Image: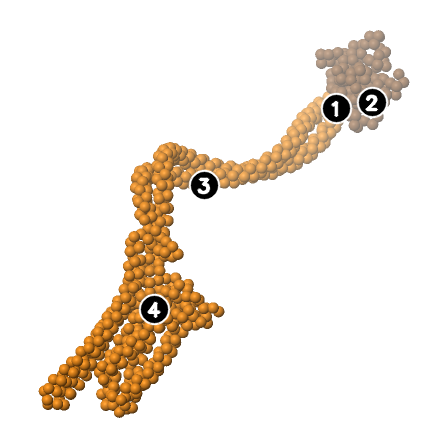
Amino acid sequence: MSTGGRIAGMLLCQAGTERVAFAAHEVATIESPSTFGGDAGSARQAYDSGPAGAERILVAATGEAVGVDTLEIDAESLVVFPAPLLLGRIAGGSLRGFVQARGALWPLMSLVDFGRFLAPSSREAA
Amino acid sequence: MSAPEGLKNLAVWTTQPSWLGSALGVVLALLYGRLTHAVPAGSGWLFFGLMVLVLAMNTALSGAQERHALRVLRALEEGRLPPAPDNLRRALQEVRRIPGRCFWFTLQGWFGGALLLAVTFTPLAEAPWTVGMRIGLMCLSLGPLAAMLVYLMVVRRSRRAAERIAAQGLSPQEVIAAIPPERLRLRRRLVMFTAVAVLSPSVFILDVSMTRTVSTFDQILETKDPKVQQEVVHRARRATGLPLGALAGLVVVLVLGTAYVAGTALAEPLRALSEDATRIAQGEVRTPRFIPAEDEVWAVSAAFTRMQAQLAQALVQLQRAGLQISSTTEQLVATSADQESGAGEQAISLNETRATTEELARSAQQIAVNAESVSAMAETTFGAAQSGQRSAAAFLAAMHRMKGDNQAIADAVVRLNKRVQQIGKVVEFINEIADKSDLLALNAELEGTKAGEPGRGFSLVAAEMRRLAENVLSSTLAIERLIDEIRDATQAAVMATEAGLKTTERGASLAAQVDSSLGLILELARQTSHAVRSISLATQQQQTGTDQLAAAMGDILRVTEENAEATQQMVAANTDLSALARDLKATVQRFRVANGEEA
């Protein structure tokens, strides 16, 4: 939940060597690739950090899903630093800002947008 | 078949003297009758006729007996029998017996004729019985004398006849064999001849003297006149002197002639023997001849003939032996000289041989010692081979057990691999469960986080559960890695076990080969041990034999040295023997052995 530049509940994920964070309230469920029935893009694809393949799939309430390698749930309320405009369009406009957690700066991505961006049909269209 | 030339009329010629002796006796008897006036006056022709008759009968009877006694000789003469040695021997035996038979034929004729004459004349002439007795007495005195004379004359002819028969093809040895000198009656015969030669004339003269004396005394007693008696005596002296002297002279001549003939018969063979003996003494040995004789003289003659034959044969052999001894002795001298030098060389060689033999004995002793060592080593090798074979057998059994154990290990590893795979599946199952648990815990934490503060505790529990699940996952991951390592190790173990199995099989095969080879080695070692024992035994025997050889060589050397000395002595002896052989040769050559034809 975001309250005036702050957000509580964060999913801190790793996609290869890259970090990515999602707001907990966007994630409807966490699936494993074996149990997930739909198509899900891998966050590695966005960073070109190795071949696709994820351990966990974050599924939004609208059905978009993003695969990550690992994830941690941080229930603390963190400050969301806004992203520069220059970066507003990258990743299909899914970058919402940055959060500082655990001594590092994490890009906060919209699961729905990022899921759409990484979806195979959208990528083919792009 | 023709008769042999030398036997013609031999039988008649041999017995011819019997007629002469008988005729001489008859003449003497007639002279006796004439002198003694034994035949009564007027019956002279009767007496003469009867005497001729008796004489004819005796002649016929004696002739028949003599022909019968010489029947084989007569058959040979007439060619009815071949002059074979057997027939010649029978004829010879007949001729040798004929003198004695003629003696008895003559005596038988005189006694038979006298008896017949006395028996027939006395009654026919009506003479007193004393006339017949005097006829018998006269025949008893003249018969043996005539028979002896016949014997002595026939015996000489029988000798000639025997020589002629023997000349037909009988050797002296065959003659001696045909007439063995068995009847040795010379003494008895001489006694009988002496008795006949003395007694017969004595009886004869006694009868004449007594008859004349009695007649003279009868005439003296018939008259008493001394003048007439003197006239009777004077007439008796005149009438008796000359006839009695003539009669006595005739008797003496007869006796002397008989003695002469007897001496000649006895001396002839002795003279021949003396001649042969003298010839032999002079060194001339002829082929022995047949010297016929009787009784002991015949024994001497036969023995002399055999001795002469043996002597001739011995001399021939002696001459031959002398020549051979001479040449052999010369060869012996030469050979002895060679042998003497050879004995020296032999002694030198034997010395070298003895040294070599002693060296050989030492070598044999060393060989025997080495052979014993080799035998001990062979025994040790045999024992080691036996031990090796037992070890190889044990090794082979161990290899078989190892193969079995490896096979068991391989089976166990396979089973372990299966179990590990099962464990992997279980771990995978656990991993799935843990992953699902992690996913569930993650979603639970997400929900707790989304719930805000109220879900905080739930998030903590979920986070804790998530850590547990992650621990399980990490553990299962570790287990999987361990399982992978175990699987790899198991696989390596399987491969190692298979390799071990193959190696064990190769080892077992090699162990079997080693066992077989050791068996062969054992057999060879046994044979070697046996052979070495045999060699050792043979070497010991060889050593013994070599020792004996060395001792024998020493003996041989000693004997050779003695032989060398003996050879030297033999050379000297052979030289002496050669001289003796020359002397013997010269001595034997003094005898000249001639055959019968040369003689």
- Work out whether B160 lies above or below B523: below
Q: Disc 3 and disc 1: Cα gap in Å?
A: 98 Å
Q: Disc 1 and disc 4: Cα gap in Å?
A: 189 Å
State the residue position of label 3: B534
Specify which label sits upstream in the sequence, 3 or 1. Answer: 1
Tag in front: 2 or 4: 4
Specify which label sits upstream in the sequence, 1 or 4. Answer: 4
Tag in front: 2 or 1: 2
Task: Please state if A2 lies on the left or on the right of B527 as rendered.
Answer: right
- Residue neighbourhood size for the residue with mark 1, other residues' Cα within 10 Å, grouped as few (<14), some (14–19), many (≥20): many
Q: Disc 2 and disc 1: Cα gap in Å?
A: 18 Å
Q: What residue do we see at 63% from left, 37% from top?
A: B407
Task: Please state if B116 lies on the left or on the right of A110 as rendered.
Answer: left
Q: Disc 2 and disc 3: Cα gap in Å?
A: 100 Å
State the residue position of label 4: B157
Task: Please state if B154 lies on the left or on the right of A21 as rendered.
Answer: left
Q: Position of residue B4 (x, y in %)?
A: 44, 67
State the residue position of label 1: B442
Q: Position of residue B22 (x, y in %)?
A: 31, 77
- Work out whether B183 lies above or below B565: below
